[in-house]
Image: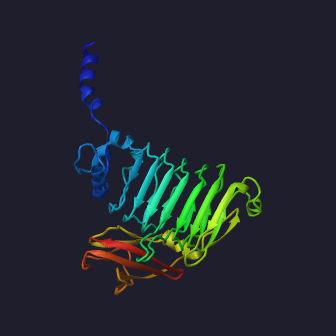
Amino acid sequence: MKKIFLILITLVPFLGKAQVTLIPDQDFEQRLVDLNIDSDGVVNGQILTSDALAVTDLNLLGASISDLTGLEDFLNLETFELSYNLLNTVSFPNLPNLKKLYFDTAIVTTLDVTALSALEELEIDDTATDMPIYCQIRELDFSNSTNFKSGHIFRLPYLELINMRNNTADTVSFVINWGGNICIEVDDPIDATNGLPPYDTWSITLDGIVDYPNYYFSDKCTLSTETFIQNNFKIYPNPAQEYVSVEYDENIGVQLRSVQILDSSGKWVRSVKENFHQITISDLSSGVYLFVIQTDKGNKTEKVVVK
């Protein structure tokens, strides 16, 4: 009995310690503090996990966030807005209750929602019409979101593929504005093309401002070579201070030729033709730059923040 008592005395401090969620991005945590979600009110790299679990609606509008680490503990999140931030790639963790996403004027090149099984609605836009279009998403995959039913897709001229396999929603509605030739991947492209059940309850509205988009159904959509470049080359880290690196698989049969650095106005700064894994940027003033990755199969432009 005495031995059991001593074990319990030893374990009590650990059992009573609150579980925390790490939030390494200070802008992310500051936004949580501003929203009264972070209960200690201090930007210290962490919040109580219980604080994260209490959130069902999260708006990170204009927080200059570049790292969403910690979002994986917001397991009860139902709606999420991520607008005017600094993320190039957004890959969502498994958030089983997340139903609605909203993005505006993002610099996102890849949006991975395949872990969001409950997702029903996505609205993505770029309303800053006086600025270049930075959102370069080329593929949206809803094949794991079987009840996805509403997509409002505005100012995504690079979009090529929407995966809607396995969909079981009663109705599906897409409004597509300012796009190109979009392949919609479905289980039965013939029935979808002819508007037969279950596709008779689908509504796809084309509402172009500059270039009217077009679409077609297929059971196997493929991305273009240009899209392959977009998905396999990236600048890291971002934001950066001293160096950046072009990350890519050297065995994919694409030759990296050069990297052109331009300022935010598009003015050429310099050309890099070697040592792509350690490009010095310490001589650049703080601000936003455009890095044009040039390959023998096509180019990719990334917006990089230099601190």
Query: In which quadrant of the rendered view does residue 220 lie?
Result: bottom right
Query: In which quadrant of the rendered view does residue 288 lie?
Result: bottom left
Left-right relation of 193 to 254: right
Above-or-below relation of 298 to 233: below
Above-or-below relation of 181 to 78: below
Task: Looking at this view, name the residue that lies furthest to the top.
Answer: 1
Q: Quadrant of the N terminus?
A: top left
Say which residue appears at 60% left-offset and 49% top-offset: 147
Left-right relation of 236 to 46: right
Say which residue appears at 54% left-offset and 50% top-offset: 119
Say which residue appears at 44% left-offset and 66% top-offset: 108
Left-right relation of 27 to 185: left
Percent position (x, y) of residue 18?
29, 36
Percent position (x, y) of residue 68?
37, 55
Left-right relation of 132 to 240: right
Percent position (x, y) of residue 272?
37, 83
Percent position (x, y) of residue 122?
52, 57
Colour theme = rainbow
Query: In which quadrant of the rendered view does residue 160 lie?
Result: bottom right
Figure disc tally: 0
Above-or-below relation of 100 to 243: above
Q: Quadrant of the C terminus?
A: bottom left
